[in-house]
Every structure is written in C-alpha cells, then in structure tokens.
Image (cartoon, rainbow, N blue to C red):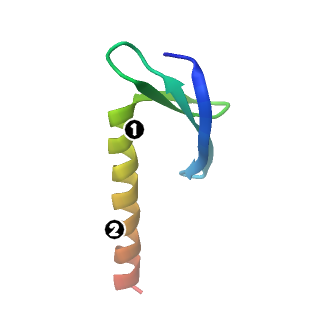
C-alpha cells in the first residue's frame, strides 16, 4: 500500500459512510483505492475498485426498476 494521494469522495453503503481515498500503488499496480471508516478499511487495486463500483451501480439500477414494477 502506497501513500495517500488525495480524498476522492465519501459514499454510503448499507447505511454506513465510507471515505474513498486514492493511494499510490505497487510496482504492479499504479493505484490503490481505500474504502474506509472507523470500523473498516478495504484496499482495492484500481481495476478491482472499477468492478466493485460498476456492480454497485448495476445493482442500484436493478433495485429501482424492481421497485417501480412492483408499486
């Protein structure tokens, strides 16, 4: 894990707020992204974070569509 470059954002997942930080990576990876709060710190490689964020967006859209269809 490298040094913190900057804070990117703050997100809420499952009622918990997390800071999203961009960190320097290793020789194999350019960046690491940390999702963290006082209870948890998740370190993801840049491509893993992209997959994670995409999965959350898709799940959110599907849930909205499901709720609209069942109103």
What's the CA distance linking mark 1 and mark 2? Answer: 20 Å
Towards the viewer: 56 or 6:
6
Which mark is nearer the camera, 1 or 2? Answer: 1
Towards the viewer: 37 or 33:
33
Badge 1 is on which residue? 49
The residue drawn where x is 58% and y is 49% is: 11
The mark that comes first in sequence, 1 or 2, is 1
State which quadrant residue 68 falls in.
bottom left
Mark 2 Cα-neighbour bin, 10 Å: few <14, some 14–19, many ≥20: few
The residue drawn where x is 61% and y is 32% is: 6
Towards the viewer: 35 or 28:
28
Q: Position of residue 45 (x, y in %)?
A: 38, 28
The residue drawn where x is 40% and y is 53% is: 56
- Asked if 15 appears above or below 38 in the picture, the reply is below
Q: Are marks 1 and 2 in contact (CB under 8 Å)?
A: no
The residue drawn where x is 49% and y is 16% is: 1
Q: Position of residue 44 (x, y in %)?
A: 42, 29
State which quadrant residue 19 falls in.
top right
Residue 17's disc is none
Judge left or right: residue 24 versus residue 38: left
Badge 2 is on which residue? 62
């Amino acid at each position: 894990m490298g040094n913190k470059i900057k804070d990117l954002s703050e997100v809420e997942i499952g009622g918990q707020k997390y800071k999203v930080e961009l960190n320097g990576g290793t020789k194999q990876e350019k960046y690491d992204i940390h999702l963290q709060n006082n209870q948890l710190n998740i370190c993801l490689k840049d491509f893993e974070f992209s997959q994670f964020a995409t999965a959350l967006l898709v799940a959110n859209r599907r849930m909205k569509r499901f709720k609209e269809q069942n109103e």
